[in-house]
Image (cartoon, rainbow, N blue to C red):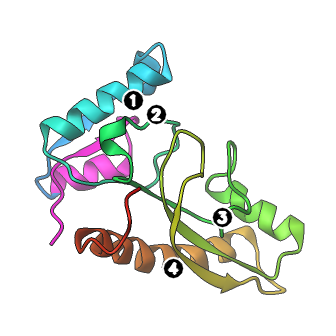
Amino acid sequence: MAEIVVVICNAPNAFGIERAQKCGLETVVLPHRAFPSVELFSHAIFEQCRSNGADLVAMAGFLRLVHIPSDFTGRVMNIHPSLLPAFGGKGYYGIHVHEAVLRSGSEQSGCTVHFVDDQYDHGPVLLQRAVPVLPDDTRETLAERVFEKECEVFPEAINAFARNWFSRD
């Protein structure tokens, strides 16, 4: 069984913080601009994770690069709105991903859950779900269909992690 021990965000006005507080969850806001480097920002994040006893860090809608400390290797999971390695990397987030998919003429898109390493949208792929790109798709209609799959596959991946179904190497 998974339990949320802390919600960490870099944006104080993020809806996720408001939602977490309404659920009575502990929340921490660490504005990335308050840190002079990615390393110090990352250190602050993982100190919070350690002090709250987190076994897994689930990144959802977290758009900043972080450096993963060795004790969290294979314990940081991300969801990305494309079938990685396609349409991943710096600048490929949210609606930008769906625009790129449509421009490319791809016949399918989807989402990917992967373990995070020190690069954007990189690291071992854990699960993927595909959706067709329809002839009349807009970036919004494609985003909606991909998001439906994200809502299915991310909890599935977290559950699989909790049951030790993934190699964490």
N-terminal of the two: label 1 or label 2? Answer: 1
Crowding around mark 4 (Cα neighbors within 10 Å: few <14, some 14 to 19, many 20+) is: some
N-terminal of the two: label 3 or label 4? Answer: 3
Instruction: Confirm or deny contact between disc 3 and disc 4 (CB under 8 A).
Output: no
Which SS class for mark 4? helix
Left or right: where does residue 21 sit relative to residue 73? left
Left or right: where does residue 96 sit relative to residue 19? right
Residue 161 place in picture, x, y as percent: 30, 68
Which SS class for mark 1? helix
Indicate whether residue 6 is drawn in magenta.
yes
124 up-or-down from 158: above or below? above
Identify the residue position indicated by label 3 in the image.
Answer: 84
Which SS class for mark 3? loop
Crowding around mark 3 (Cα neighbors within 10 Å: few <14, some 14 to 19, many 20+) is: many
Identify the residue position indicated by label 1 in the image.
Answer: 42
Residue 46, located in which quarter of the rendered image? top left
Residue 55 place in picture, x, y as percent: 21, 53
Instruction: Confirm or deny contact between disc 1 and disc 2 (CB under 8 A).
Output: yes
Q: Amino acid at mark 4?
A: Lys
Q: Amino acid at mark 3?
A: Leu
Which SS class for mark 2? loop
The magenta-colored residue range is: 1-22
Question: Which residue is drawn at the image coordinates 44% and 26% (left, top)?
Answer: 32
Tell me the distance, in whole angstroms, between the alpha carbons under discs 1 and 2: 6 Å
Of all residues shown, which one is farthest toward the left? 24
Label 2 or label 4, whichever lies nearer to me, is: 2
Identify the residue position indicated by label 2 in the image.
Answer: 67
Which is nearer the eye, 141 or 69?
A: 69
